[in-house]
Amino acid sequence: MSRRPLSAAVGAALAGGAVCAIGALVDPQAVLRGWLASFAFWIGLPLGAMMLLFAHDLTGGRWGAAAVPPLRAMVAVLPLALLLLVPVLFLLPELYPWARTAVAVHLKNRFYLNAPFFYGRTAVYAVVWLGLALVALLCSGRGRSNPLAAPGLILLGLTVTFASFDWFMSVEPEWGSSIYGMMIVSGQLLGALALATLAAILGGRTDTGQRRDLGSLLIAAILLWFYLSFMQFLIVWQENLPHEIPWYVARLSGGWGWVAVLGALAQGALPFAALIWWPVKRSRGGLAAVCLLLLAAHLLECWWLIMPGLEGGFSWFAPAATFAMGGAGMAVFLWRLGADRRHSGRSEQTTRTAGLMAEGIRHG
């Protein structure tokens, strides 16, 4: 693998990190807002990748030959992604109203939203995810059965749902939605599948059938995300309750309303319309363009979900945080993907050599 992409990733991480470090001296709250919103995007990729790996272990499919290597590389980024949450954990009151004494005393759910319990749950999520990541890297995509795939999927579904409540939904502690966790999971699946498909295409290891299968999976993921997102909006609109409506009012007012429309088009209607046209699914360029659009739209969605609910709203440090986290994560991703491909190449060469030796012995 060329060193240029790896160098670019490291450069992006250093540049974004430097901007965030300078911003922390000027406006630390603004940096934290952008940091949490960008963290929502980057933590979702390894988690979504784990879910897809376990799903492939259970169902199989030729799409795995192309998608499993980049999915495994995404899972390897998980330890780094979890470390990115540390600044948030140290500065909880800056982001979460329930962590401030003056607000907490008036909350009905303070038995759940309090710092000690929050830290404890976060530790449980980290331990469970790191354990499942180790299982995924040791067993998934190795051509062997994975008896922990089914329970792993269940554990991931539960822990990711509660983590989304804790880390993202609780920035507005008086608002809640039972669909929110599933909506977050659907976005993570879509983002991880889009990145895996893009990496497989750029790596030149996909045939027409695999691209068609990956395109079909993307259609299913788009429909799942769109259905859950629309159902949450529809339920809140129908109920018309004063304690639920403000969440959408903040996200449909001003510039955020245009972001919502753009997200519905870029993460829903446009990629769906493109992928149901079979030449796009079979085309390397067309499928890669759809994946790039989906990843950009998913990043905007993460910003849209979190920043309107925080005091101060949008932060221009969000792009810098995205580059800082993404550069570091992509460096690990590219390194792991290159290592797996080198290992796979050596294994294939060993298999071919053994086959030739056996053929020579038979004819000898």
Image (cartoon, rainbow, N blue to C red):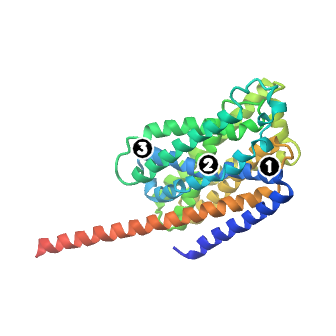
Is the Cβ of the residue at disc 3 closer than 8 Å to that at disc 1? no
| Quadrant location, the C terminus | bottom left
Which one is nearer the viewer's eye here, 184 or 278? 184
Q: Secondary structure at mark 2?
A: helix
Q: Amino acid at mark 2?
A: Gly
Mark sitting on residue 259:
1
107 relative to 42 in the view: left or right: right
What percent of the width, then of the height, locates residue 210?
Answer: 47, 57
Q: In the orientation shown, which residue stands out farthest toward the left?
A: 364
Where 201 falls versus 83 (above or below)? below
Q: Secondary structure at mark 1?
A: helix
Mark 2: few/some/many CA within 10 Å (<14, 14-19, 20+): many
Please give the residue where the numbered disc 3 appears in the rendered image. Answer: 59
What percent of the width, then of the height, locates residue 306?
Answer: 76, 44
Which one is nearer the viewer's eye here, 300 or 314? 314
Please give the residue where the numbered disc 2 appears in the rendered image. Answer: 44
x 66%, y 29%: residue: 178
Question: Can I make out residue 1 in this image?
Answer: yes
Which one is nearer the viewer's eye here, 56 or 339? 339
x 76%, y 29%: residue: 236
Which one is nearer the viewer's eye here, 38 or 71? 38
Q: Amino acid at mark 3?
A: Thr
Q: Amino acid at mark 1?
A: Val
Mark 1: few/some/many CA within 10 Å (<14, 14-19, 20+): some
Q: CA distance from mark 2 to mark 3?
A: 22 Å
Q: Secondary structure at mark 3?
A: helix
Q: In the orientation shown, which residue stands out farthest toward the right?
A: 254
